[in-house]
Amino acid sequence: MSSWIRTGIIAVALSAAVLLSVALVLRDMKQKTIDELRQLNAEMSERLVQHQAMIERLSRSRRVAHLRITDQATDDEGDVESTTVEFIELDDDGGELGRQTFIVPGEVLFVDAWTVKFEPADVAHGHPLRGRSLCLLRRIYSESLSAEDGFPIDTPGAVPPGYAVGDVSRFEQRLWEHFWTLATDWRAAQSMGVRVAQGEAVYKPVRAGQRYELVIDATGGMNLTPIGDDSPVLSRHDADEDIHPTPR
């Protein structure tokens, strides 16, 4: 075999080897690119899920109480003298915690509470202790009954019914025990991750037959929202209801 034939065969073999090597490298690069894209897509999907969860936590609200205006007494001129309201505290699942009936003078109903709000980042990330605004219902009164003489709902300094036990309960107990310090001392508030601690009141003129939900936002305050007659009616306790007469 002549030298030029051998040279040609060697050249062809080398070219084939080079082409094979290039093909293998390209195949590996393609597979690596596909794997990287899949990983990037998975990470983006996970981030999207986390982002959506954060948005949901920030925009979440929960029902605190259900109010029914069961009766109103009027004078000879038709002006409302007193309003009877059934006040039903709710747990996080909407179940009934307690039920009281109040008779207050007038027709403009007030509900006030202590609220503690945390940083949006803590709420967005679902912090175990600071993942939502907290609310301690305090009293119910009217435009004709001063706040000081209003009827108490929850006990100041106590953890409201239905709250979690353990570390969460102990944390919330500290918040309520030192509420006004947190409300007025920014260093104390900062030490416990509190953004705002303050008293809040919601109020509206009401009429017999109306129903309302008391709602608190995850990062915001309270809202008193009217609900329709087609809303589910909570079951009554078998125990006698606690009737509070209008104070003199």
Image: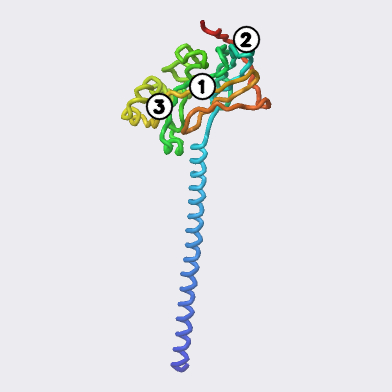
Mark 3 surroundings: few (<14), some (14-19) or many (≥20) residues within 10 A: many
**SS assignment at label 1:** loop
The residues bearing labels 2 and 3 have C-alpha atoms spaced at a distance of 41 Å
Q: Residue at x 46, y 24 (%)?
A: 200
**For residue 184, what is the image quadrant?**
top left
In the image, 54 versus 219, the foreground residue is: 219
What is the x, y in percent for residue 136? 46, 21
Amino acid type, callout 3: Ala
Mark in front: 3 vs 1: 3
What is the x, y in percent for residue 10? 45, 85
Residue picked out by circle 1: 162
Indicate which disc residue 197 carries.
Answer: 3
Indicate which disc residue 193 carries.
Answer: none
Left or right: 118 in relation to 85: left
Residue picked out by circle 2: 75
In the image, 82 versus 55, the foreground residue is: 82
